[in-house]
Each structure stands twice: as structure tokens, then as C-alpha cells.
């Protein structure tokens, strides 16, 4: 066991650094001192605008006022992702944060829907999902109801640099010390732990525990401690992105768009003041110049800057906690932003660290537990991403044909087989994505179960039809009286003045 942990040093002031500083300080308060070092000259990766619902938990733990947050980060509401051209060109589907129908014991709702389909009804499953109905109507508000059928889970799109600024202010108010400067040298103990960071100016910063939030370079975890990297490029071959902001559309819709192209996909993220756009692509299929041209010709609005190419390797840092260094953010690995999971991985790493915080010294068992949990989390998200690519019916390009032939992990192959046979879905332990997420992407990508659960036959046809109609009515009823998403935002921002 090493020494007691009092001083925590965070290297990096991107979303990972400032979120770590804010959450650790909020929860551990006076038990630790935190110093964060960042370099304006190096800057941040400058992307990362779409989130998933657990971000709201972080904001609430931090005591953030939602109106103020929406105003300061130029945020919009996110209810879903719309995937276009993924199964075949010209078709789209939604992956919403909601769930179709209602939850039922033993027989999931979609089995009822499946039976109805076999009876000739063509209503899409999404028509029983309130999130989808709000997306289609471009509407949003808080629905004040205890009825689980009227739950409307949401997340945000925000300007990542404004979010980091917001978190910095909060952290500094709580007593986090910020030091500007570029770390040039790293001093280790005789055993190999990190002891001190030396800045370009000569300033020396010592600590007991170091959080590496230095981005893709992983300055401490990789460059110093050589923690290793599991490269997953063979499973998810996109390895570059080109990003550019553009003018906003007249109306902001409450969902992200993920539009598939011949060898990658394009995101479109609506913010209050602009759109975030980017093309994620495989460099084996597109040159940077081709990708840039493709993105710029698909913006539909005037660009607000020059496109920026970002290179990445998909995979995870093998030991995310090694010695007295924990990698959080891009230094811990990267999975492309298809399901907006990176900021969530930051959040979940911090929560894991808080649970296992080594206040009396670093215990190898705690380190092993941390690393085991993070490996499972990365692997489960990876498999969900592969599903989007692998199950496709596109024949128009080598990229999509190759993805169909991909040798996928056994765990994913099994999950697809079980669903394709009888429509059954089982949530793996702690999987971030619930059954409703797997269901929507499986169906959206064209995995249609051959059978449904026999419990769906427990109702007469007439009873089944009236039950399904009733659920649909309950879900659609509030939508007409909701304000538009833009009116909602305007009201919230006014409240923050
Ligand atoms: C193309 C793309 C799209 C993405 N989209 C999404 C998305 O929609 N949703 C989502 O959740 N996530 C997304 N992400 C991920 C998201 O951007 C990151 O998880 C998030 O920004 C955290 O980055 P970071 O703080 O780890 O690294 P960075 O932003 O790179 O910050 C690194 C920090 O370390 C500092 N630093 C580095 N070296 C030194 C040094 N020697 N001395 C001092 N300081 C140093 C830098 O100055 C900087 O402050 C996306 C990522 C990419 C690449």
C-alpha cells in the first residue's frame, strides 16, 4: 500500500479534466486538494457536443441550475439519434432515449407489436414511443406526470468548450487551483510512481495521485507508464473525423442526426447558436481531402470556420489505472461518437474512482477492480457500436460490404442470434444500453425476429388491438399541447436572466 492520498493533480483542462475536478471536489470536498494544469497553447480537442441522459445526474450532483446551464453552454435538448442510410440508402430510423409501449413482466412490449404485425398491422414500433413522437413534432417540455408511460428521458447537445468553461468556474469556486502552463518533464520515484510535473516555466507541481486528462497523447499513463492499448480498429475501422461548425437551421430539432455515407457517417448536432458537423470516416477508403469535400457539400448551411481533421485509434488503454495515475477522457481510450458515449465514459470513470478512492493509499485490489469494470464498460459499448455497422444491407460500397463480413465478437453474435430467433433481449450486467436501445437498433438495422413470445397470444385479437391503440393514444395525447423545442429553450433561457 502506498501513502495516504491528499493532493490530487489533474493534467488537462478539457471536458475530462474539468469534469473530474468539479465532481471530485464536490463529493470529496476537504478530504483532498486539487490542482489542475492546462495549457492554452496546446488547447483541447474542441469536439464532443452530444450527450446521453446520465449527464443530467452529473449536473444535479454538481448543483447546476438547468436554465443557467442551457443558457451558458448554448445547449439544446436531445431526445434521440436519427440514423439515416445505415441499413440501406434512403431509409432512416430513430434510437430514442425512451422505450416503446410500456414495460411488462415476462413478455416485453415488442412481442405484442410483433404479433400485431403478423396480423397485418403496419404501425412502426416507434409510434408507441413518446420520445419519437416529440422528435417528429419538434416539441419538448417537462411533462408533469407520475405515469411511467409519459416518461420523456432526455440529454443535451452543448458547446463543449462552453461546458468546460462552466465547469472550470464551478471548480474554482469550490477551491480547485488552476495552473496555466505546459508540462515538459515528469519526475518519477525510484519505484516508478509519478511524483512531480515540471512546467515549461520551471514550476514544479507535486502530488499523491495524478489524473491523466491530457487527451489522446496520454502523457502520464502512456508516455511515462506505458500502460498499453487494446487496438480495436479491426472491429471499428473508422479512424478519422473532420469537423466544422455551420450556421444554425431556422428550427432546432431535439435530436442528433447520424447520416451514413459510403465509408463513414456524418453527425449534425443542433446548438442554439450553430450546428456542430463532422464526418467520421475510414482513411483506407477516403482521403482527408475527399472527406472534407463530402462534409462541406453536405452542410446545408454556411460554414463558420475551417474544417479540422482529427486522427484517432479506436480502442482502450489496457490499464486505465496504473501505479498512482488514472487515465480519464481521451487518454483512457476512444470509441467513435456514434452513440455519444465519451463524455459518459468520463462521468462513469469519475464515479468509479470516487467509489474506490484510495484515501489511505493505493491498494492493488482496488486498482484491479477499477480496471476490470472499465474494461467491461468499454467492451459493451464497443459491441453496441459494431452492431450499427455490421448489420446492414448496403451493397453500394466496399466499406459496407466489408462490415457485413466482419468477424464480430462472440458475445455480440450471440445477442443478435437470440434476438433474431424469438425477439428476446437480455441486458448484460451493467450494460449502459438498455433493452430498448438494443431493440431499436436491431430493428432499425433490419434484424426482424422470426417469432414472438407465446404470452403475446394471451389476448384476443380485438383486445390486443384496443390495448395497443390505447397505449398509442396515451403517448400521443400530451404532444399536441407541448411547446416547440425552440419555444421551450427560449422560456428556459429567459428564466435564467
Ligand atoms: C471527432 C470526435 C467527436 C466527438 N464527439 C463526441 C460527442 O458527440 N459526445 C461525446 O460525449 N464525446 C465526443 N467526443 C469525445 C470528447 O470530445 C472527449 O471525450 C472530451 O472532449 C474529453 O476530451 P479530453 O478532456 O480527454 O481531452 P482534450 O480535450 O484533448 O484535453 C486535453 C487537455 O490536456 C491539456 N494538455 C495536454 N498535454 C499537456 C501538457 N503537456 N501540459 C499541459 N496541459 C496539457 C490540453 O491543454 C487540454 O486542456 C468526440 C471526440 C472526437 C475525436
Image: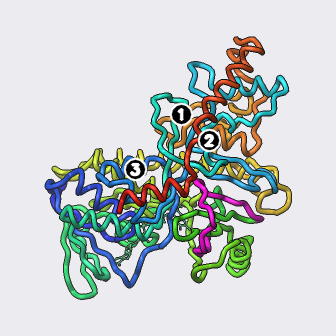
Whether residue 457 is situated above or below residue 62 in the rendered picture: above
Residue at the (72%, 40%) spot, across then down: 443
Q: Quadrant of residue 369?
A: top left
Location of ligand 1 given as a quarter of the image: bottom left
Whichever of callouts 1 and 2 sits on the residue coming sooner in the sequence is 1
Q: In the rendering, which numbered label is found on residue 348?
A: 3
Q: CA distance from mark 3 to mark 2?
A: 36 Å
Q: Nearer the viewer, residue 477 or 315?
A: 477
Q: Point out residue 471 in the picture as x, y percentages from the top left corner.
A: 64, 26
Side of 455 relative to 74 (left or right): right
Q: Is residue 308 left or right of residue 171?
A: right
User: What is the crowding at mark 3: few (fewer than 14 residues within 10 Å), some, or many (at least 20)?
Assistant: some
> What's the magenta region?
240-262
**Helix, strand or loop for disc 3:** helix
For the residues labelled 1 and 2, say whether their Cβ atoms are less than 8 Å apart.
no
- Is the residue at mark 2 in contact range of ligand 1, meaning its CB lies under 8 Å from it? no
- Which residue is found at the position 50% from the left and 42% from the top? 153
Amino acid at each position: 500500500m502506498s501513502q495516504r492520498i491528499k493532493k490530487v493533480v489533474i493534467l488537462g483542462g478539457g471536458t475530462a479534466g474539468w469534469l473530474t475536478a468539479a465532481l471530485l471536489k464536490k463529493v470529496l470536498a476537504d478530504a483532498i486538494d486539487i490542482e489542475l494544469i492546462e495549457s492554452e497553447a496546446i488547447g483541447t480537442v474542441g469536439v464532443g457536443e452530444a450527450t446521453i441522459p446520465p449527464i443530467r445526474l452529473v449536473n444535479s450532483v454538481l448543483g447546476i441550475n438547468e436554465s443557467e446551464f442551457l443558457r451558458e453552454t448554448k445547449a439544446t435538448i436531445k431526445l434521440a439519434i436519427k440514423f439515416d442510410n445505415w441499413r440501406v440508402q434512403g431509409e432512416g430510423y430513430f434510437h430514442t432515449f425512451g422505450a416503446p409501449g410500456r414495460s411488462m413482466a415476462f413478455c416485453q412490449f415488442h412481442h405484442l407489436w410483433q404479433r400485431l404485425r403478423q396480423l397485418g398491422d403496419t404501425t412502426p414500433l416507434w409510434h408507441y414511443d413518446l420520445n419519437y413522437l416529440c422528435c417528429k413534432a419538434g416539441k419538448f417540455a417537462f411533462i408533469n406526470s407520475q405515469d411511467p408511460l409519459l416518461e420523456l428521458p432526455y440529454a443535451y447537445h452543448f458547446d463543449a468548450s462552453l461546458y468546460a468553461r462552466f465547469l472550470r468556474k464551478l471548480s474554482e469556486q469550490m477551491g480547485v487551483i488552476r495552473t496555466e502552463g505546459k508540462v515538459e518533464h515528469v519526475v518519477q520515484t525510484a519505484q516508478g510512481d509519478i511524483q512531480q510535473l515540471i512546467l515549461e516555466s520551471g514550476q514544479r507541481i507535486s502530488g499523491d495521485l495524478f489524473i491523466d486528462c491530457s487527451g489522446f497523447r496520454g502523457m502520464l499513463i502512456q508516455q511515462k507508464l506505458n500502460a498499453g492499448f487494446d487496438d480495436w480498429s479491426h472491429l471499428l475501422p473508422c479512424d478519422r473525423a473532420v469537423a466544422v461548425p455551420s450556421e444554425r437551421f431556422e428550427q432546432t430539432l431535439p435530436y442528433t442526426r447520424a447520416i451514413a455515407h459510403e465509408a463513414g457517417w456524418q453527425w449534425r448536432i443542433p446548438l442554439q447558436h450553430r450546428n456542430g458537423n463532422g464526418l467520421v470516416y475510414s482513411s483506407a477508403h477516403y482521403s482527408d481531402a475527399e472527406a472534407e469535400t463530402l462534409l462541406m457539400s453536405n452542410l446545408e448551411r454556411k460554414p463558420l470556420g475551417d474544417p479540422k481533421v482529427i486522427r484517432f485509434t479506436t480502442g482502450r488503454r489496457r490499464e486505465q489505472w496504473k501505479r498512482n495515475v488514472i487515465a480519464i477522457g481521451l487518454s483512457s481510450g476512444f470509441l467513435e461518437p456514434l452513440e455519444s458515449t465519451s463524455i459518459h465514459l468520463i462521468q462513469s470513470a469519475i464515479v468509479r474512482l470516487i467509489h474506490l478512492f484510495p484515501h489511505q493509499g493505493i491498494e492493488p485490489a482496488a486498482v484491479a477492480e477499477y480496471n476490470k469494470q472499465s474494461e467491461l464498460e468499454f467492451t459493451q459499448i464497443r459491441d453496441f457500436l459494431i452492431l450499427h455497422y455490421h448489420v446492414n444491407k448496403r451493397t453500394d460500397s466496399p466499406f459496407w460490404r466489408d462490415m457485413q463480413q466482419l468477424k464480430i465478437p462472440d458475445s455480440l453474435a450471440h445477442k443478435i442470434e437470440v434476438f433474431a430467433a424469438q425477439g428476446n433481449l437480455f441486458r448484460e450486467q451493467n450494460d449502459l444500453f438498455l433493452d430498448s436501445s438494443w431493440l431499436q437498433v436491431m430493428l432499425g438495422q433490419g434484424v426482424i425476429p422470426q417469432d414472438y413470445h407465446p404470452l403475446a397470444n394471451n389476448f384476443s385479437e380485438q383486445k390486443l388491438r384496443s390495448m395497443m391503440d390505447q397505449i398509442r393514444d396515451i403517448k400521443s395525447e400530451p404532444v399536441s399541447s407541448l411547446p416547440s423545442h425552440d419555444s421551450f429553450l427560449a422560456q428556459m433561457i429567459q428564466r435564467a436572466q
